[in-house]
C-alpha cells in the first residue's frame, strides 16, 4: 500500500515538472513576440506614418523570435538548457529516491498477483471437487433414500421385536411370581387348616374323654403315656397337651 502511494506521488511530481517546463518555454516565446513587434512598430511610425505603419505591421507579423538555448544571462528569456538541466536534476532525484520504493512496490505487486492467482487456482480446484461431489451425491440421492428408508424400517422392526420380547419376558416373570405367591399362599392355608383341624380334633377328643372315660381309664391312659414318654422323649408342645389331659380328667 505504501509503495503504491510512493509511485503515485512520483508520477504526479513528474507530471507537474513537465507541465512547468512546457509552460515556461511557451511563456518565453510569447513574451518575445510582443516586444519585437512593439519595437518595429515604433520605428516605422517615426519615419513614415502611412507606409511605415504598413511596413511595421508587415514586419511585426513575421515568425517568432529565436529561442534562447544557452544564454543564461538573459533574464527575459530563460535558457532552454537551464530548464533542461533542472528537469534532469528533478528526474534524477525522482529516480534515485523513488527507484527502491518503485521496485519494491512492483515486486510486492508481483508477489501479491502471484498469490492471488494461486489462491484463485486453489479455490477453483476446491470448487470443482465440491461440484463433482455434489453431482455424485445427486446421482446417488435415490439410492441413498432407499437405503435410509430400509435402514429406518429395519430399525423400527428391530425396536418393535425388542419391545415385544421385553413384554413377553415381563409377562412370563409376572406369571412365575404370581404362581409362586399362589403356591405359598396355598401351602400357608393348608398349614393353617391342618393346625385348626388338629386343635379342633384335640378339643373334641378332650370333650369325649371328659364325658365317657372313667377315673380308672384316665389313670390307665396316664400311665401308658408316661411309659411311652419314658421310652422316647416327645416334643414340648405334645407333652404339654398330653399332660393337660389327666389334669382335666382328674378335675372332672
Image: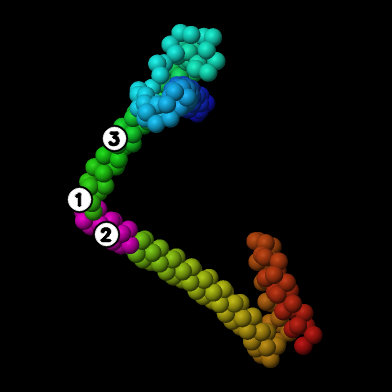
Disc 3 secondary structure class: helix
From the viewer's side, name the closer residue of 176 and 226: 176
Disc 2: CA contacts within 10 A as few (<14), some (14-19) or many (>=20): few
Disc 3: CA contacts within 10 A as few (<14), some (14-19) or many (>=20): few
* Comparing labels 3 and 1, the label whose residue is closer to the camera: 3
From the viewer's side, name the closer residue of 175 and 42: 42
Q: Which mark is residue 149?
A: 2
Q: Position of residue 107 (x, y in %)?
A: 41, 19
Q: Which residues make up the magenta segment?
A: 142-157
Q: Main secondary structure of the magenta part?
A: helix
Disc 1: CA contacts within 10 A as few (<14), some (14-19) or many (>=20): few
The residue carrying mark 3 is 125
The residue carrying mark 1 is 139
Q: Which mark is residue 227?
A: none
Q: Position of residue 60 (x, y in %)?
A: 39, 26
Location of residue 200 by image quarter? bottom right
* Separation (CA) of disc 2 from disc 3: 34 Å
Amino acid at each position: 500500500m505504501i509503495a503504491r502511494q510512493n509511485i503515485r506521488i512520483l508520477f504526479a511530481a513528474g507530471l507537474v515538472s513537465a507541465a512547468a517546463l512546457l509552460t515556461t518555454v511557451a511563456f518565453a516565446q510569447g513574451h518575445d513576440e510582443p516586444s519585437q513587434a512593439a519595437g518595429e512598430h515604433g520605428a516605422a511610425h517615426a519615419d513614415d506614418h502611412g507606409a511605415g505603419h504598413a511596413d511595421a505591421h508587415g514586419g511585426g507579423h513575421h515568425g517568432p523570435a529565436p529561442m534562447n538555448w544557452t544564454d543564461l544571462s538573459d533574464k527575459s528569456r530563460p535558457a532552454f538548457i537551464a530548464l533542461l538541466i533542472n528537469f534532469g536534476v528533478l528526474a534524477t532525484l525522482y529516480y534515485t529516491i523513488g527507484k527502491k520504493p518503485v521496485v519494491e512496490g512492483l515486486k510486492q505487486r508481483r508477489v501479491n498477483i502471484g498469490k492471488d492467482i494461486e489462491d484463485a487456482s486453489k479455490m477453483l480446484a476446491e470448487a470443482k471437487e465440491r461440484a463433482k461431489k455434489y453431482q455424485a451425491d445427486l446421482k446417488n440421492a435415490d439410492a441413498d433414500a432407499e437405503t435410509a428408508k430400509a435402514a429406518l424400517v429395519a430399525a423400527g422392526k428391530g425396536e418393535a421385536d425388542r419391545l415385544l420380547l421385553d413384554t413377553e419376558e415381563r409377562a412370563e416373570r409376572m406369571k412365575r411370581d404370581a404362581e409362586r405367591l399362589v403356591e405359598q399362599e396355598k401351602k400357608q392355608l393348608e398349614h393353617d387348616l391342618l393346625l385348626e383341624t388338629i386343635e379342633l380334633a384335640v378339643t373334641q377328643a378332650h370333650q369325649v374323654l371328659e364325658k365317657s372315660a372313667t377315673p380308672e381309664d384316665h389313670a390307665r391312659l396316664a400311665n401308658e403315656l408316661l411309659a411311652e414318654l419314658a421310652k422316647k422323649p416327645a416334643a414340648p408342645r405334645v407333652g404339654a397337651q398330653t399332660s393337660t389331659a389327666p389334669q382335666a380328667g382328674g378335675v372332672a
